[in-house]
Image: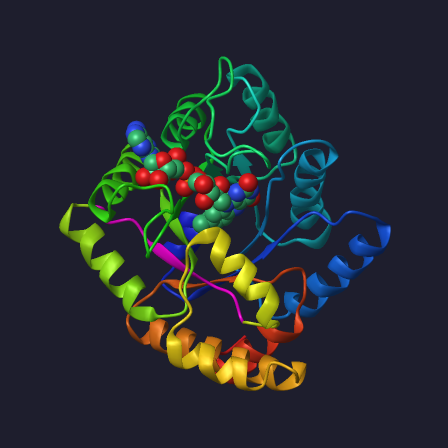
Amino acid sequence: MKIIDIIRQGKPVFSFEFFPPKDIDGFDKLFKTIDNLKSWNPAFVSVTYGAGGSTRSKTIDLVGRIKNDIGLESMAHLTCVGNSSDEIFKTLESIKKQNVDNVLALRGDPPSGEENFIKPANGFGYATELVQFAHENFSFCIGVAGYPEGHPESLNREEDLIHLKNKVLAGASFIVTQLFFDNQYYIDFVDNLRKIGVDVPVIPGIMPILNLKQIKKFTKMCGAKIPKNLMARLEKVQGDPESVYKIGVDHATDQCEKLLKEGAPGVHFYTLNRSRATLSVLERLRFPK
Ligand SMILES: Cc1cc2nc3c(=O)[nH]c(=O)nc-3n(C[C@H](O)[C@H](O)[C@H](O)COP(=O)(O)OP(=O)(O)OC[C@H]3O[C@@H](n4cnc5c(N)ncnc54)[C@H](O)[C@@H]3O)c2cc1C
């Protein structure tokens, strides 16, 4: 089923993001995680697309298994990195063969060691081109990434929003945001999108903080800011993982509660392939399963 049709049913949509594990042990743990989260009836589950090599075929296998064996709606992430349009066509065909109806179309980050994204030969330089290509050649429901605090490479917020609008005009049906820790960024982002005529659903992406060192690394990479008072509370207890976890879950729960009250269509959880924190947030939100 297409994600946009699930969103249109009007109930808050909860979704979970996973990455393809490296080894069999990781797969066992991931399937346990999915099993733990399944009873929350996620609207969909998404699987990230790696920089290259075997993890890419794992993404396609996983979205197929999640859809066909576990019975959850799934979405494959797909990037423009390192592939020609012919190769991307074949990947989209293999996603379709898995009976998967949804694709998150991304440009991707520059490969490690490279500073700038270089358009692959006969490939695409921006996600907009991938959206257009997938929209013209297939019937997927297409999602795209949005950045409440601005994409790290963008010159300014206004231009970033115009580029996002172009992804929607090219055929995207919904937006999933980069993680953020201050809801005001999301509220302003959605307001500004509506002002320029973008009216597709914008699903906020939330990552409960589990580990201070790890979250500092993530936020440095993606440009999200941790509010000063939250950072101060986390730093105070940084030697005590359980206290860090508790603050992380409290903050994520508070964010989700307020976002849903503000009219967000749901929440996309960056799970890091673990279920404990996401389950705690969902349980505390007390949403009917
Ligand atoms: C929900 C979500 C899921 C993600 N999943 C993955 C994943 O699975 N695998 C992965 O590798 N990465 C993933 N990413 C990270 C993403 O690939 C990076 O953030 C990447 O740097 C940008 O991808 P994009 O699709 O937003 O690019 P684009 O929309 O192409 O934007 C990239 C930059 O180019 C600018 N831009 C766009 N169009 C133009 C134009 N015509 N002219 C000039 N500038 C332009 C934009 O403003 C932005 O600064 C994900 C991000 C999010 C938010």
Residue placed furthest toward the left = 195
Residue projecting furthest to the right: 24
Q: Kindly identify the residue that appears in the image at 45 percent across and 27 percent down.
A: 134
Residue 207: percent from left, percent from top: 52, 66
> How was this image coloured?
rainbow
Q: Choose top left, top right, bottom left or bottom right for residue 184.
A: bottom left
Identify the magenta region: 198-208
Left-right relation of 43 to 194:
right
The answer to if 202 sits in the magenta stretch is yes
User: Residue 59: x and y, percent?
Assistant: 66, 40
Q: Is residue 140 one of those drawn in magenta?
A: no
Asked whether residue 171 is in view, the answer is no
* Image height of 157 relative to 32, above or below: above
Position above or below: 3 against 129: below
On the image, which quarter does residue 127 sit in?
Answer: top left
User: Residue 168, position in %: x, y?
Assistant: 30, 38
29 to the left or right of 133: right
Ligand 1 quarter of the rendering: top left
> What residue do we see at 32% from left, 51% from top?
150
Foreground residue among 52 and 58:
52
Quadrant where the C terminus is found in the figure: bottom right
Residue at left offset 42%, top offset 23%: 133
